[in-house]
Image (spheres, rainbow, N blue to C red):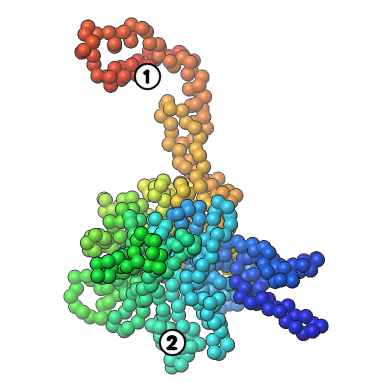
Amino acid sequence: MLVIWQLSTGQQQHLPHLTAAIENIVVSPSGASYAVSLANNSVIVLSTTELEAKTNIIGVQSRRVDLEQLPRESDANYYSFNIFSQVPMAIDPKNKHQIIFSMPSSQPRHQQKRLHAEPYVQTFDLASQTAMARQALTRNNATDPNMGPDGKRIEEPNIRFLQISNDGKWLATVDEWHPPRADMSYLEEGIPEFNQEERSFRRETYLKFWEWDEKNAQWSLQSRIDAPHFFEDVGAVARVFDLAQDPSGLGFATVGEDRVVRIWRPKTRMRNGVVVRGADKNSKGGVVTWSLDRSIELSSKLDVFDSNPDPTNVLVPRTSRLAFSADGSVLAVGVSWASDADPGVIQIIDTFTGTVRRSITELDVTALSNLAILGRYLIVVGDSISVWDMVLDQVLYCVPFDFTEIDRMDTSSLVRLAINENDGTFAVACPQFGDNDSSKSRGTRYFKKATTKVSIYDATQSKALWSSTIPEVALSLIAAKDGKGYIVLDSTSSIRTLSPRASALQLLTPPPETVAPQYTDLNGIDSDDEEMKDFGDRNETLTGVEELLRYSENDKPVVRSEQLQAIFEVDDSHVLPPVKDLFNAVVGLYARKPRVVSSV
């Protein structure tokens, strides 16, 4: 709220419901305008008399992590890697230059040590570099009271996942809310772990399906699934570990803490055999409702053939990831168990029958971070990059990570993976943190600097095609839809585009040498020279081109008239050979190698 207080009369004038906390106020030299800087990376210029906005400048409003603003206390809770967790982001298929990502309502710079909830989404146009829209997808403090009876700020739900269907008409989101610790203090009984368990049992989780409203240019809520994953035995809501979109049609999949994979698909609502129409009577389609289409339960025992119902033999999942194949026929589910003694499992599910076709236990997915399917290859990212050939049913290659001062279990929320079906590549972003050199203890560590190494791989080669280091932590990584390349959203609310450069022109003869695509950061970040991968020596290629040009005038075959006459001249015209044979014979004369080659 902006308050203008007239000191002479004591009168106050209020401008309530600003979009974020006020960071700074500047008065113009003439006194006719106020410039207000807000804590969501936006600036509003107001007229002094009417208090109406004359100009609104909006930047990228994603989560911002300023390492210089982090506290320097030695409490390990201040340095949780949760502040670097992934920001849900997707490309809008209706406009391939627009991306949509979650954002907090406000993030003041003096509150950097806490992770702010992200109840909004912002649509940003990469072509025009402008913010297009902002919309709330959960309950928020702009529409609900933001103060509780005790005077404390009410926490907002947090958007954890979002995916857009291939046609761009449907948006699926998962938001989650926990009650504050202070509200659960009456149940603690002197045991903090018990308080945390009760908070987790009282979480609120919603799976929402939004339809694009072309008339109002916004997402309209069509279906809400309360507690999509649930513990039947204790009557508590389970966490949702991942949300995936079916690339072959309308459908989404979720996997939860209850060790169940659920596939959700739309249905047109019917009443007595008649399609139910919505508020728009002119709409050709009826009201669409999303519901559960298939449910697949994952094994929860150390030995799937063990019929002993001993509850101590049940495994508790730490995390889980999903990945659809391009045709939607295969769904891969990677499960990392809470027990470090078990390496985890990746299960290959047939989406048509809902049966598990293969359980891959040869890979260690204890620190599972990401999962993807690119063609025939299954890409698994944990504390290493593993590529599994699903046709040959074996490991193709494995590339270990070189983490600096990062615990193995923290990597699951830090490493990013994206695949690009257009060029058959995948990209991996791995963060690297600088620590306090005077202390080796994690409890007394603070982040002095942070960078991210982005590498682009071909699924068939263990050596990176391109690699570069960006100066911030990558919070999200997705593949560009309008061609080849990738989009990176970092911790300074900056968007970087990685795109391949055009390769040098090669002559048709002799056959050109294979040249790997050269990627470049369009934001001006140059890659390291030793990390730029170019198959074939460029100097040798240029030398070969010069020699071809030098002797090109002596490399033309001479075709005599009698040779052409021998092809076309036959006794009877009705016994002419096929046109294809005539064409091949003529081309063979002009494309053959010269009989005499001039010497140097």
Q: Amino acid at mark 2?
A: Asn
Horizontal and vertical percent position of residue 497: 53, 52
Under circle 2, the secondary element is helix
Amino acid type indicated by mark 1: Ala
Q: In this orientation, which residue lies closer to the viewer: 217 or 172?
A: 217
Read off the residue under disc 2: 195
| 179 to 507, vertically: above or below | below
Residue sitting at x 50%, y 21%: 549
Label 2 neighbour load within 10 Å: few <14, some 14-19, many 20+: some
| Residue 371 at least partly seen | no
**Can the viewer see residue 170 in this picture?**
yes
* Coordinates of residue 108 in the picture (x, y in percent): 62, 73
Tell me the SS state at disc 1. helix
Residue for point 31% across, 8% down? 565
**Cα distance between the residues tagged 1 and 2:** 82 Å
Residue assigned mark 1: 591
